[in-house]
Each structure stands twice: as structure tokens, then as C-alpha cells.
Amino acid sequence: MDFFLSWQTRCQSVGIEYDERIYENAQKNKETAVSSGRVSFEKVDATEFVVPDQADRMYFFNPFSVEILQHVIARILESYYRNMRPIQLFFYYPSDDYIACLMNAEGLQFADEIDCKDLFPGENQRERIVIFELGEIAG
């Protein structure tokens, strides 16, 4: 996803990965990716990652437990209060527990939902991207 976003939007992208195997594969993919100059990877526990003060878009792929999500949201809020700016958070394949956690998180507002059920066979209700915002997003 980091390579795709950087290629499509020309953004700087940072991938956070805890699993050594996945991290090494991402680094190997970076060797040949067109957008590799705008992509970096950090091998770190998400609860310990310090969110850069300029980061304003964050994508999560069914990443971890609700408890870890709460720590990550706290890290995002720390960054936000150091440098207040509009932030959008994108969550692919969220569980009901994730949605409940996000709906009750300080400062987060539900913004939109993208239905992705047409991407795979079946009618899995989790095949969607939910978008939450922090701060005022200019429309």
C-alpha cells in the first residue's frame, strides 16, 4: 500500500511493521519499486512509533488488537497536539470493536465509508474502508 499511495499521490509514505519477515519483504520490494524514493519502512512496535508532526494521512490494514489501536491513537493525538493540523485516518477491514473504539476516541469524527464488497466474492460486511478525521478538514 505504501508504494501504491506514493506512486498515485506522490506523497511521502512510512510503513510501520513489527513482523521481521514482512519488514524484510517490504525492504526487498523497495529495491525495484518506482516510488521507492518516497517510501520508508520502520521495524517497530506500533505502540512505540512516534508519529511525525507533519503526518496527515494514515492507513491501517486490520492491523492489531483494540488495545494496541488505543495506544496508536494516543500517539497520533500526541503528534496532533504538538502540531495541530487536519488528519485523516483510513481503516480497511475494521472489526466492530475497532469501530466502537474509534467512535469513542477523543477528537475523532467519523467522516465516510467506502464499500469494498465488490472486490472479493461474498458479502463480508468488513470489506470496507472507514475514514475518521481529527481536526478541521477543508472540504
Image (spheres, grey):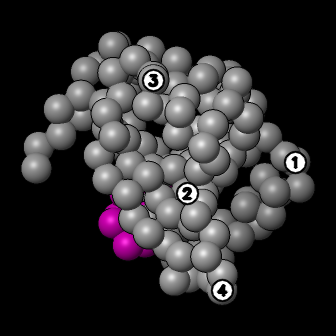
Q: Nearer the viewer, mark 4 or mark 1?
A: 4
Lower position in the chain sequence, tag 4 or tag 1: 1
Residue located 78% across and 53% down the image: 23
Three-letter code for the amino acid on which mark 2 is drawn: Tyr
The one nearer the camera, 86 or 83, is 86
Three-letter code for the amino acid on which mark 3 is drawn: Asn
Disc number for residue 92: 2
Tell me whether circle 3 and circle 1 mark residues in contact (CB < 8 Å).
Answer: no
Disc number for residue 104: 3
Q: How far apart are marks 4 and 1 (CA)?
A: 31 Å
Lower position in the chain sequence, tag 3 or tag 1: 1
Disc number for residue 20: 1
Tell me whether circle 1 and circle 2 mark residues in contact (CB < 8 Å).
Answer: no
Q: Give the range drawn in magenta.
A: 6-13
Percent x, y of residue 84: 25, 21
Percent x, y of residue 100: 53, 33
Whether residue 8 appears in magenta in the rendering, the answer is yes
Lower position in the chain sequence, tag 2 or tag 4: 2
At label 4, counting other C-alpha atoms closer than 10 Å, the crowd grade (few under 14, some 14-19, many 20 or more) is few
Above or below, 139 against 30 in this view is above
Q: Distance between the residues labelled 1 and 2?
A: 22 Å
Disc number for residue 121: 4
Q: Distance between the residues labelled 3 and 1?
A: 32 Å
